[in-house]
Each structure stands twice: as structure tokens, then as C-alpha cells.
Image (cartoon, helix red, strand yellow):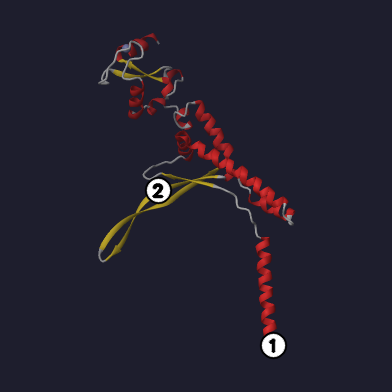
Amino acid sequence: MEQKDLIFLFIFVLLCFVLLLVVMTIMRNPFQFPYMTIYIDISGKRNVKAEDYIDRYLINNKFDFIKLHEEKIKKWKKDCNYTIRSSMLEEYRQKQYNKILDEGKTYQFIFQRLQTRYYQRNYTKTAYKIMNEDKMFCCSYDYLLDRYRKLSMIELACPLSEYESKNQRKLMTKELRRQIMIRDDYTCQICGKYMPDEVGLQIDHIIPVSKGGKTIPSNLQTLCSKCNGKKANKL
Ligand SMILES: [Zn+2]
């Protein structure tokens, strides 16, 4: 072979390669589904129920972020549709688009734990922390919307599983007692006695637990022990 032929062969191979690259670029899927990733720290927690943490996330006013993301997805869909309609490969693009749609798993909650690791250098051990993925929970917008509606019906008071819990008395925490006393200004809600030292005050379930009353702020009130006793006798 002469040198000239070699050069031609080289150019030919190069052109083929470039052509292949161009074809691959055109054929590859241009769409990417916009997932939302939410990280939740569960360091030191045991028996983690994903649903409870998602409820708490929603209770803490984070549903706005979800709604915002849902708007983003709507806009993304519009843009995709435009891309598909204006493409010469309309049918092919439509198939590619359908393939990556994944609305059932749009919201990805990643549960992480902070873990201590060590590294050794010159005989000294140094601790450092890393975030480790523990588990993942994926769901759709409808799932979150449904949970948020149910939570709203109970005034975003607590996770749904707690609300449905058979053991409502167990949900009475020190923190909740304090919260109710502050709300009621350390005043008995029947006789109006003001007792800032908290000693004679009790937290009462307005609808008793035995009659299906829940341990949520709207069903709790501050009473002095006298009034609470009278109420108990009446019932
Ligand atoms: Zn009283």
C-alpha cells in the first residue's frame, strides 16, 4: 500500500467514527426524570418506620417543597412534549420519554445514619464521621398528598400511626404536657385558677381516652386537680 492509500484509509476510519458518534448522540435518550431526593437523619434511632418520618417531614411544613417540585414536574412535562412534537424522530422520542416516566417513585426519601470511622496515622487514631445510607422509601405525589390530607384532618398533630395507636396514654410526653400548659397559660380551663408553679395542674383529655379521645393538642386541656377530680366523678 502506498502512503496515499494509508492516509485515505485513516480519514475513512475517522469519518466512520465521527458518524457513529453523531448517530449515538442523536439516538440517546435526551429526557431525564426529575426526581426529588430528601435526606432524613435517623442516627441513633431504632425500629425506624419510614411512614412516621415522612409524616413528621410533612407536619413540619415541608409539604410546600413537595408542591413546588410538583409544579416543576408539570413544567418539565410541557417542555418534553414540546421537544417531542418538534422532533423529526417524534415517535422514537415519545417512546424514549414514556420509558423514563417514573411518577410512582418521584419522591425518594433516603434515611441516613451518622457513623464513626477511624483512621490511623503515626500511631494516633483519629475519629471522623460519615453519613451512611440505611434505607430508601420511594413514593408518588398522590401518596404524599393523601397522607398530608389525613394529617391536616388531625391538625398536623402527630404521625398517623400514633393517632391510630391503641395506646394513646403512652403518647403523653413531658414535652406535650409543657406545650399544653404554656398554651393554656398555666390556668385551669374550668375554674380559671392560675398556677404558674405547675404543681397542682393536670393535663386532661377533653374526650376521655376510654371513649376514643386522642392525645392531640385540640383534645387536651389544663385543669387543676380539683376540677379534674370532679370531671372524673361525673363521667
Ligand atoms: Zn379548676
Q: Residue at x 54, y 30 (%)?
A: 149
User: Which numbered circle lies on residue 4?
Assistant: 1
Image position of 191 (left or right of 214)? left
User: 10 Å neighbourhood of mark 2: few (<14), some, or many (≥20)?
Assistant: some
Image position of 194 (left or right of 157)? left
User: 10 Å neighbourhood of mark 1: few (<14), some, or many (≥20)?
Assistant: few
Q: Amino acid at mark 2?
A: Arg
Label 2: which secondary element:
strand
Q: Which residue is mark 2?
A: 113
Query: In front of the other: label 1 or label 2?
Result: 1
User: Which numbered circle lies on residue 194?
Assistant: none
For the N terminus, the quadrant is bottom right
- Position of residue 16 measured from the top left corner of the image (x, y, whole percent): 69, 74
State which quadrant residue 53 falls in. top left
Question: Can you name the residue that lies furthest to the bottom here?
Answer: 2
- Position of residue 112 measured from the top left corner of the image (x, y, whole percent): 43, 48
Q: Is residue 168 above or below residue 121?
A: above
Image position of 21 (left or right of 117)? right
Q: Residue at x 65, y 48 (%)?
A: 79
Q: Is mark 2 within 8 Å of ligand 1?
A: no
Q: Amino acid at mark 1?
A: Lys
Label 1: which secondary element:
helix
Q: Quadrant of ligand 1?
A: top left
For the C terminus, the quadrant is top left
Q: Nearer the viewer, residue 75 or 198?
A: 75
- Position of residue 171 measured from the top left corner of the image (x, y, whole percent): 39, 28
Question: Real-space Cα distance between discs 1 and 2?
Answer: 65 Å
